[in-house]
Amino acid sequence: MKKTLKKRWLIFGTATLIGAISVWIYDMLEVPEVPRLASSQKDVRCLNYPVSASIDVSNPLSIAVWNIYKQQLDGWEDELLALSKTSSLILLQEAQSSQDLQHYISARQWHSNQAFAFSVNDEVAGVMTLSELAPQKVCAYTKVEPYLRLPKSALYSEFPLSNGQTLSVINIHSINFTFGIEEYREQLNALVDAVNKLDGPVIVAGDFNTWSEKRLKTVKTELNRIGLQEAVFDTDARLKVFSLPLDHIYYRDLVLNDANSRRTLASDHAMMTASFSFNVN
């Protein structure tokens, strides 16, 4: 009981301090009033792309999921390069659209989309999805942190499959500092409502900030309720807070071949990888 109260007061105290600091820096940032993509087109929440190719369902699909810590630590380019050699989809959280990252994307000829959570010094922060093939549709979602007053973001992408179905991929960075889980649940429920309407294979992955038992149970219960199951890692090196993992991969209507996570000095979060096969009838 004492440990639980101590954790709660620690979280509350940290959130209050960060909230006070965020008020001081808020005027330095650009924060969109509505969800939008980090696109040259202003105030666009969703984009549709012409379909030029589809994902071959006869081959396994390999993905990587990584909170890249705003590329603040050395070695992120090498780690991202290693991931790109084995992954067709890379879901990044805390991506910062620096010139170095943009150069990397251009040099590797990745298709990229990013949610515009906020920007500072003309660099956009938000989740980013990299893909070998362009999606047919992409949409941005945001939810404002109650203490930081800065949005956390999610990105929805649709990819055409060779069997005529659609692969739906949601890249999410859940809100962090809350006292209670009301705002956290609101963000999750919006995701659940969106996924529940989807047909075909679904992947939901990212940094869920599940640092409390209530958060972890809420995510598991709600995503299991709509048919998603969590990837179990063969090697599990995920970042844990209060002994609970923050990052997860959930999926539906796919066969999990393997999943692993690996620590890196290039971020405070481990990188997650997974390979899936499609249910081909």
Image (tube, rainbow, N blue to C red):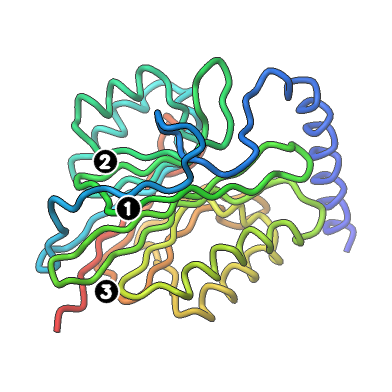
19 left or right of 156? Answer: right
Residue with the mark numbered 3: 255
Image vertical order of residue 279 relative to residue 18, above or below: below
Residue with the mark numbered 2: 83
- What element does badge 1 sit on? strand
CB under 8 Å between discs 2 and 3 = no
Residue at 29% x, 73% y is 254
Measured from the top left, where is residue 180 in percent x and y? Answer: 80, 59
State which tag comes first along the sequence, 2 or 3: 2
Measured from the top left, where is residue 163 in percent x and y? Answer: 14, 72
State which tag comes first along the sequence, 1 or 2: 2
59 left or right of 223? Answer: left
Question: Label 1: how many residues lie within 10 Å, few (<14), some (14-19) or many (20+)?
Answer: many
Residue at 47% x, 41% y is 44
Q: Amino acid at mark 3?
A: Val
CB under 8 Å between discs 1 and 3 = no
CB under 8 Å between discs 1 and 2 = yes
- What element does badge 2 sit on? helix
Measured from the top left, where is residue 235 in percent x and y? Answer: 37, 57
Q: Amino acid at mark 1?
A: Thr
Residue at 64% x, 70% y is 218
Residue with the mark numbered 1: 273
